[in-house]
Amino acid sequence: MKIKDIVPVALGKQQADVLLKNGKIVNVYSGKVEEANIALFRKRIAGVGDYTEGKEIIDLKGLYVVPGFIDGHLHIESSMTSPREFARAVLSKGTTTIIADPHEITNVLGLRGLQYMIESTEGIPLNVYIAIPSAVPSTSLETSGDRLGPEDMVSFIDKYPRRIIALGEVMNYPGVLNRDNELITKIEILRHEYKKIDGHAPGLTGKELNAYIDGFIRSDHESTTAEEAYEKVSRGMQVLIREGTAAKNLEALVKAVDSSNCRFFSFCTDDREPADIIREGHIDFLIKKAIRLGLDPITAIRMATINTATHYNLRSMGAIAPGYKADMVVIDDLKNLNIKMVIKDSRVVAENEQMVAPLTGLHEDLPEVLGKVNLPDFSGADFKIPAGSRKIRVIGMRLGDLYTDSLVMDARIEEGSAVADPEGDLVKVLVFDRHQGKHISKAFAKGFGIKRGALATTIGHDAHNLCVMGVDDKDMFIATKRVQELNGGIVSVIDRKIEAELALPIAGLMSDKLLDRVVKELEEIKKAIHRMGSRGDILMIFHFIQLAVIPELKLTDRGLVNVAEQRFVELFV
């Protein structure tokens, strides 16, 4: 769009393409609600005021209009849907812009995965900005599918200078503190391109936090307490308050927000399952919950819009103002926030939380299958764990939290092997290297509540090796074999019978099916998990049992990891 083309519309000398009239506009700059009309020209807002003419006129009938919502940090892959189907889900909920870090698929497929995420979102009616992954692999303690080095980043930034907006979350904070040469080089490349550097520093405080921020890392989404969030804001960080499927931090962190610091808080979902998006919402859900917890509605809307846009230097997003992108959400009021209409690039794309516009992009020949599951040769005997002693280290799982505990418990020994103990809530866990087909690691976990059967998946942050847990070796074998046959997915087995499955042919992370189908099959998986004995929503935390950058004890394909010390530890004490 040329400036000389939009000026006559702003002056009222030329008819608007679309006129939104009789709306109550939430002004994120003034903090006030103003009654006015909005003149749209092409994909921009030409002006706000007493405009009366438009080629198309939409009467809002006194409804509120807010800027399109922005998710400050997420992984599309965690929705288990393709990028197009993910866009369909969140657009209907008012999210018009996302900052996506595709380090999940990039850890599996390298540049091929990153290219797929960019091409599959090119030209669709959702602003998808990419934080190029910093952690491929995330640590040296796991087998990843590929490596993304500084030289790869240079070529991608040159190729997609507008799409790549940041360096993806720097999870290897010990690497920053220890001045790891390759990691520091990645940071230097992005900061000299004036891109943001996203953070990931759970529990970091004091001088170590200062040193981490010295690496030009200006955001963090891992705070779990108000005190931690307040310290990070005080040291110059943008704190992204996260409310995902497994990690739910909003209730704790909103206590840190006040009138003097609210501009430095934003919202993000990080990892959110599709059923949660459909039933509860996306960023709209976080706004509503924050308001219920006592946050001023306009402050909450600012955190979902202009705050995030300002942090990421999205100069034409996050507000309803002249020259800004015509991305808006029409809601009933500032308490219930029920979405009546979503406008993207001056076009109505959703009404009453249902898409009404086609979702197409520039690339329509995207593959339905991407990547291959390459496991080591295995048999039933590989699921046995020969006893080394009576004491074992156990991964203590926490519902609603990605942190784990490092426990020491008595092993249950049968015929010389350590076995699961369903009565003691102790399950066996195995991780198979699915990239090079070399390693199998074994451990135990407590907290899942599983009493029978087995559950296998190729989702395992961040290397996404195949992980299976259960109380019966034969069920574990069947589940693992079926996931291999599906070329990636999630499978539940009880008493030698496959109870439910979800195929994930796109890198073993995403389905090629429509959103509703994915939600339905995922529901069957969760029902099967319930029949296995678990009473909690454990699937997402199971998917994080491999993540060796969130304390305290994790299991990669190469062994048990003490996260704080970034070293392997023995299963038997």
Image (tube, rainbow, N blue to C red):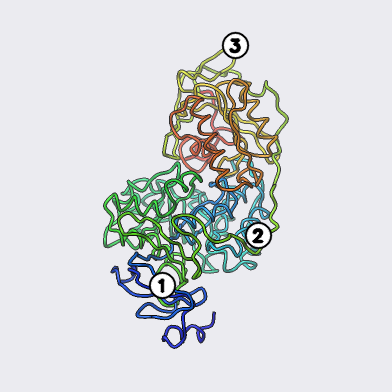
Quadrant of the rendered image containing residue 487: top right
Distance (Cα) linking label 3 and label 2:
51 Å
Distance (Cα) linking label 1 and label 3:
75 Å
Q: Residue 85 carries which label?
A: none
Question: Of residues 96 and 435, which is closer to you in this image?
Answer: 96
Q: Mark 3 points at which residue?
A: 415
Image location (x, y in percent) of residue 131: 54, 59
Q: Name the residue under label 1.
A: 20
Q: What residue type is labelled 2?
A: Asp
373 over 2 or under it: above or below? above
Image location (x, y in percent) of residue 520: 54, 40
Q: Quadrant of the N terminus?
A: bottom right
Q: Name the residue under label 2.
A: 152
Q: Residues within 10 Å of mark 3 (few under 14, many from 20)?
A: few
**What is the residue that sits farthest to the top in this orientation?**
415
Quadrant of the rendered image containing residue 560: top right
65 over 420 or under it: above or below? below
